[in-house]
Amino acid sequence: MYVRDAMSTVVLTIGPAHTLRQAASLMSARRVGAALVLDPDAEGMGILTERDVLNSVGLGQDPDAEHAHAHTTNNVVFAAPTWTLEQAARTMAHGGFRHLVVLEGGEPAGIVSVRDIIRCWAPTREMAF
């Protein structure tokens, strides 16, 4: 199975000036665990994850005052849609992160998460009650 089979094509993009509360609200509404942060004044893209928001709140920071740019990971690791799920899982395990941005033709085509991979490897079974 390949990354293209598991990835979510719902890619939320936000700006660096979004507050963490705004980012969390958008991620929750779209039911995604990460947002791409596109800064027109910087090169490349960053990623803000649910863990970044959680860490900030856990430190007692105000989610209405903290902005995405201060919590964005800028050294993003990218995957290709043609990677195997094993390649993606190995990359995530080695890097210690749970999301990979999938690029196709230099543009974001999706995001694949550990959860996406698990869903492919261990399909949901009907539970008898």
Image: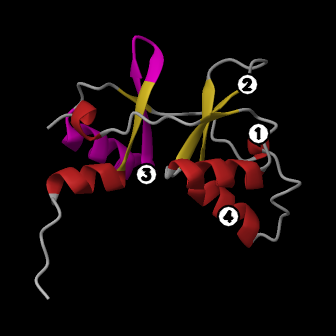
What residue is shown at x 31% (from left), y 50% (from top)? Answer: 116
Instruction: Tell me the amino acid under the disc marked 4.
Output: Asn
Q: Earlier in the sequence, mark 1 or mark 4?
A: 4
Q: Is residue 50 above or below residue 18?
A: below
Task: Please state the horizontal and vertical placement of residue 66, each as a whole percent of the image.
Answer: 84, 52
Position of 103 with respect to 48 (left or right) is left
First to last magenta residue range: 84-108
Question: Which amino acid, mark 1?
Answer: His
Which residue, as the protein is rendered here, is positioned at the far top?
105
Tag 3 residue: 98
- According to the image, label 2 marks what residue? 39
Q: Say which label, 2 or 1, has the lower sequence index.
A: 2
* Residue assigned mark 4: 55
Badge number at residue 69: 1
Categorize mark 4 by other alpha carbons within 10 Å: few (<14), some (14-19), many (20+): few
Measure the alpha-carbon separation of dots 4 and 2. Answer: 22 Å
